[in-house]
Image (cartoon, rainbow, N blue to C red):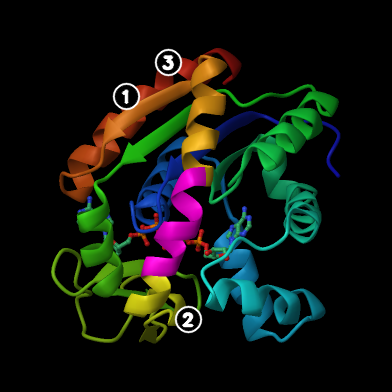
């Protein structure tokens, strides 16, 4: 683990709300490491590591992976050098137990969650977004058939790798993810609201205006520790 940590932004949103899309923009603009637990799990599944073998069944059923496994993986990631300058969390925490652990880990490093922007999107839009999504093999960069097509079909604009559809984006698994995970998301939203760091952003608009609103919400909260 690194001895200290910089700014910490927790990007919240339901499955398909646009966390990965926005995290890519925000992490670059703000100079934060993009830490996405879903991406870490997908890499572990691809590499068939012991962690990947455990995680796969939960992910395929649309369930959360158990906290112990998830937290251990996150701690390992936070110990990497790029995290010291500050992190943008995407997909963590997913329940209040994870949120409490995060607070404790950050406090031990003299840090805290500076701001938790919440991308709010209605459920019907989530289903449409996940149904049309493609992501790239190398970096997990997200695209969409209608709203964000790649310049060359089937190829990532950023790293040139092949695009594929996530197995958990099949309609039955999308329904399971929403059914099983939206309640826990509500609890996390309330957790950060009660701590005064929640900033809700209307996620129904196109990618650029949502990014502008997120930047406006994040800047005042993180500026003091730049
Ligand atoms: P994870 O990978 O985190 O998936 P998720 O939370 O379900 O979110 P998604 O990645 O599906 O959506 P997103 O919000 O990133 O949207 P995106 O930007 O791609 O987790 C996967 C699984 O891993 C979980 O189900 C669980 O099993 C496990 N897991 C992960 N973290 C865990 C944890 N902490 N604890 C336990 N288990 C964990 O956008 C979606 C689509 O919409 C794209 O096609 C995009 O192009 C399009 N789009 C984006 N923004 C817009 C917009 N403004 N307008 C129109 N289209 C848009
Ligand atoms: Mg994502």
Looking at the magenta stretch, what is its main secondary structure? helix
Q: Residues within 10 Å of mark 3 (few under 14, many from 20)?
A: few
Can you identify the residue that label 3 sits on? Answer: 220
Region of the chain picked out in magenta, as a range: 175-183
Can you identify the residue that label 1 sits on? Answer: 216
Can you identify the residue that label 2 sits on? Answer: 137
Residue 34, image x and y in percent?
Answer: 55, 50
* Position of 121 relative to 62 (above/below): above
Ligand 1 shows up in the quarter that is bottom left
Q: Check disc 3 and report its element: helix, strand or loop.
A: helix
Residue 86, image x and y in percent?
Answer: 63, 36
* Position of 95 relative to 46 (above/below): above
Q: Residues within 10 Å of mark 1 (few under 14, many from 20)?
A: few
Q: Is residue 178 magenta?
A: yes
Residue 154, image x and y in percent?
Answer: 28, 86
Q: Is mark 2 within 8 Å of ligand 1?
A: no
Q: Check disc 2 and report its element: helix, strand or loop.
A: loop
Along the line of sight, which residue is nearer the eye, 80 or 43? Answer: 43
**Displayed quadrant of residue 58:** bottom right
* Left or right: where 219 falls relative to 114: left
Along the line of sight, which residue is nearer the eye, 224 or 64? Answer: 64
- Of mark 3 and mark 2, the one earlier in the sequence is 2
């Amino acid at each position: 683990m690194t001895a200290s940590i910089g700014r910490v932004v927790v990007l919240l949103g339901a499955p398909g709300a646009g966390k990965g899309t926005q995290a890519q923009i925000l992490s670059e603009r703000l100079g934060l490491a993009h830490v996405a637990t879903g991406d870490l799990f997908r890499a572990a599944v691809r590499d068939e590591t012991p962690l990947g073998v455990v995680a796969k069944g939960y992910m395929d059923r649309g369930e959360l992976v158990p906290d112990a496994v998830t937290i251990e993986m996150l701690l390992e990631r936070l110990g990497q050098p790029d995290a010291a300058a500050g992190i943008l969390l995407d997909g963590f925490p997913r329940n209040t137990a994870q949120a409490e652990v995060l607070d404790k880990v950050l406090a031990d490093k003299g840090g805290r969650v500076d701001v938790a922007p919440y991308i709010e999107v209605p459920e019907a839009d989530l289903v449409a977004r996940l149904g049309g999504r493609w992501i790239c093999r190398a970096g997990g960069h997200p695209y969409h058939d209608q709203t964000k097509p790649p310049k060359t079909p089937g190829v990532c604009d950023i790293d040139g790798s092949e695009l594929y559809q996530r197995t958990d984006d099949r309609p039955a698994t999308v329904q399971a993810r929403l059914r099983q995970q939206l309640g826990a998301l509500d609890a996390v939203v309330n957790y950060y609201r009660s701590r005064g760091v929640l900033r809700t952003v209307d996620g129904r608009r196109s990618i650029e205006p949502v990014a502008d609103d997120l930047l406006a919400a994040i800047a005042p909260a993180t500026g003091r520790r730049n």
